Amino acid sequence: MAWMALVPGCGSAKLPPMRSLFLIGDSISVDYGPFLAAAIAPWFSYARKSGEDLARANLDVAAGANGGDSRAVLAYLRARAAAGGFRPEVLLVNAGLHDVKTTAAGLQVSLAEYRTNLAGIAALAKELGSRLVWVRTTHLDDRIHNAKTGLGFTRHQADVDACNAAADEVLAALPRIDLHGFSRTFTDPFRDHVHFREGLPAQQAAFLAGALTQL
């Protein structure tokens, strides 16, 4: 699926230079974030949820720059909005990999709540006057992921697919960048159970930057 097909009105107008962009996303975004900041520097002033060192200490835990699940992302954005002084022109957001963490109790965030949280994020972005751009959640390999011991949870690609389908429906009127589809083109992509090997986050950042500069 080409990202361009997911961006309404793509190519009809370009954003003026040096708009403010704020990123919040999962650990995948922690990896590609520095490359994205450099790639979009001519067009956007870049900021993100802080705490990259804390996030990198354990990428499987939602801490620091790792935004976590959709519930946590919505709560964080609501807190920033309530504090004032937070009105990015572009809000680049992803959540999904933490939502689909599965234990004996079930999904960390149910699909129904995921949909509600995404609708809440979209409504908040509208209140702030920010243009919400959604990043579709990257894939995993069930066999590789669930062979890793000590995580305390499993994940399944079917749940990732369900989250992406829900996002496509709930956010149908908003720009969505298909990082999932792009990342599926990589050969032997993972350095561990879900994170991408060296060199690939830079390619993901370039893909995202290309989409952002053509909105």
Image (cartoon, rainbow, N blue to C red):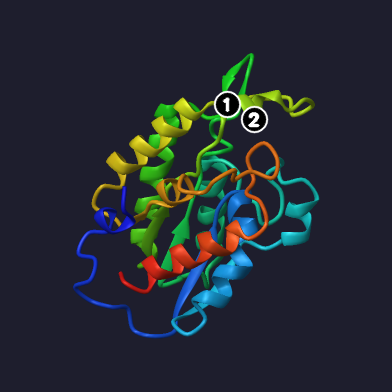
Left or right: 191 in relation to 137: right
Checking the image for residue 199, the label placed there is none
- Find out whether the residues at labels 2 and 1 contact each other: C-beta distance under 8 Å: yes
Spot occupied by residue 94 in the image (x, y as percentages of width and height): 49, 50
Q: Quadrant of residue 91?
A: bottom left
* Depicted 41 relative to depicted 192: above or below: below
Q: Residue furthest front?
A: 187
Kindly identify the residue that appears in the image at 77 percent across and 25 percent down. Answer: 149
Q: Nearer the viewer, residue 21 or 208?
A: 208
The residue pinned by badge 2 equals: 145
Spot occupied by residue 54 in the image (x, y as percentages of width and height): 78, 55
Left or right: 6 in relation to 57: left
Q: CA distance from mark 2 to mark 1?
A: 5 Å
Spot occupied by residue 92 in the image (x, y as percentages of width and height): 46, 61
* Depicted 98 relative to depicted 31: above or below: above
The residue pinned by badge 1 equals: 142
Give the amino acid at mark 1.
Answer: Asp
Kindly identify the residue that appears in the image at 71 percent across and 46 percent down. Answer: 59
Q: Quadrant of residue 68?
A: top right
Give the amino acid at mark 2.
Answer: His
Mark 2 residue crowding within 10 angstroms, few (<14) / some (14–19) / many (20+)? many
Spot occupied by residue 67 in the image (x, y as percentages of width and height): 60, 50
Mark 1 residue crowding within 10 angstroms, few (<14) / some (14–19) / many (20+)? some
